[in-house]
Amino acid sequence: MDEVSRTRYPLLIEGELDPNVSRWLWLVKWILAIPHYVALAFLWLTFLVLTIIAFFAILITGRYPRGIFDFNLGVLRWTWRVAFYSYAALGTDRYPPFTLDDVPEYPARLDVPYPEQLSRGLVLVKWWLLAIPQYLVVGVFLGGGSWAASHADEWAWGIGFQGGLIGLLVFFAGVALLFTTRYPRGIFDLVLGLDRWVARVSAYAFLMRDEYPPFRLDQGGTETPSVDEGTPAAIAAEPQAASEPRRGGTAGRVALIVVGVIAAIIAFGLLAGGCALVAVDRTQRDDDGFLMSPSVEFSTPTYAIVSENADIDSGGAERALDTFLGTVRIRSESDRAVFVGVGPVADVDRYLEGVANDVVDDLDNTGDPEYSRRPGGAPSAPPEGETFWAASATGSGEQTVDWDPQEGDWRVVVMNVDASRGVSAEMSIGAELDSVLWIGLGFLGFGALFAAGSALAITAAVRRR
């Protein structure tokens, strides 16, 4: 296929090489561009959220919402300007403007014509299945085999130092600048061709166009208009004029969308937490109304199983502690007669001083307990005869200890009634926690408010004026 008969992809990306690029400034551009990196981090988070919204809009209506398209196009423009300034090209020392609008006077420009109609079927597969060959190629350009997973949120165009072929070529250009003060034109043309390939794949993957990106390297800073035979030349120029600049109020729209996305994230957390709390309250209570943990098998060849310290400090708000936590229940089940007691740390440690026991440190990933062993001998007396226990139960089968928490340091101890070796029991712990339902409902209420605020902010920002 000759040069004249090739149809240009409906995306324009250009960069004009500054003949007076500094020989050393490229070494510190990563510092100078930090304000842009911070802004783009929020903008790309918003971009991805809005792309998900656009996905469902295309799936239902076949149209990409124009307000979202204009914002996302603005993010791509901003990203390309920063990338051209920094480590995707090093093409200029002119500092990028902080705007989503097209800036004709800046030496790096990008435009994508708005698609009036998009395929509702393609939107389901093009961004992951159909684009896999392109991802593999672009992964070589940018470094890493999975461009979609590791670079999509940054567009991977010089937002910081990059690996891959583009990063290597730009590094060679920087070294040439450092020693010769000249940017090799051949490297620049090749880098711009690779950047152009990445841009086309980005527009396709982010659902902005249905046309499949060509496997073609169009080098150079400018795109030469080329059309099929019989096609009016005006069509070739479509990308330059397809998206009208929308000046004025850019900062306000960006701020609204960023606030809306942050509110959406908070709303999601609150709604998820509220649903979880309500579900737990409605499904996990026992017949007596206690929220209980799953049962765990505890066993030791020593004389006692001991919990870690439970430090209860209400800060003088005992009523609040009682209202929130309520009565604590410890349930055990064993074939042997066991003793389960809750006592002050100082008294428990004094009783078990010199006694072999296992202290429960944690539960591993499978739910099995992990212990710290304390060596020693047998206890001097059975546990049931001690008087310091705040609550206790004794016997075989299922035993229940109900304890009203008080300030102080406490331990739970499980021993055989006769203080013999080899303790084994299935244990669970819970509490009344009457406030869980109300806390969950409160989370749901606040989550709904944040969700409504998010919707209003994003709608106001992306609505066409």
Image (cartoon, rainbow, N blue to C red):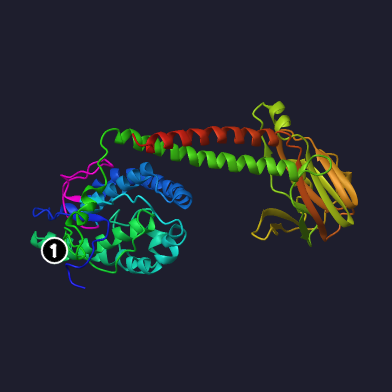
Callout count: 1
State the residue lying farthest toward the front: 230
**Whole-percent x, y for residue 265 in the image:** 49, 42
With 298 as the anchor, is 218 left or right in this view?
left
- What is the crowding at mark 1: few (fewer than 14 residues within 10 Å), some, or many (at least 20)? some
Q: Is 327 covered by the magenta stretch?
A: no
Front residue of 118 and 278: 118
Relative height, residue 70 to residue 158 (above, below):
above
Q: Pick the quarter of the image with the C terminus.
A: top left
Identify the residue position indicated by label 1 in the image. Answer: 176
Q: Is residue 165 left or right of residue 304?
A: left
Q: Residue 89's image quarter?
A: bottom left
In the rendering, at what x and y percent does residue 105 appear?
15, 44
Highlighted range, magenta: 88-108
Disc 1 element:
helix
Q: Nearer the viewer, residue 176 or 158?
A: 158
Q: Residue at x 30, y 36 (%)?
A: 250
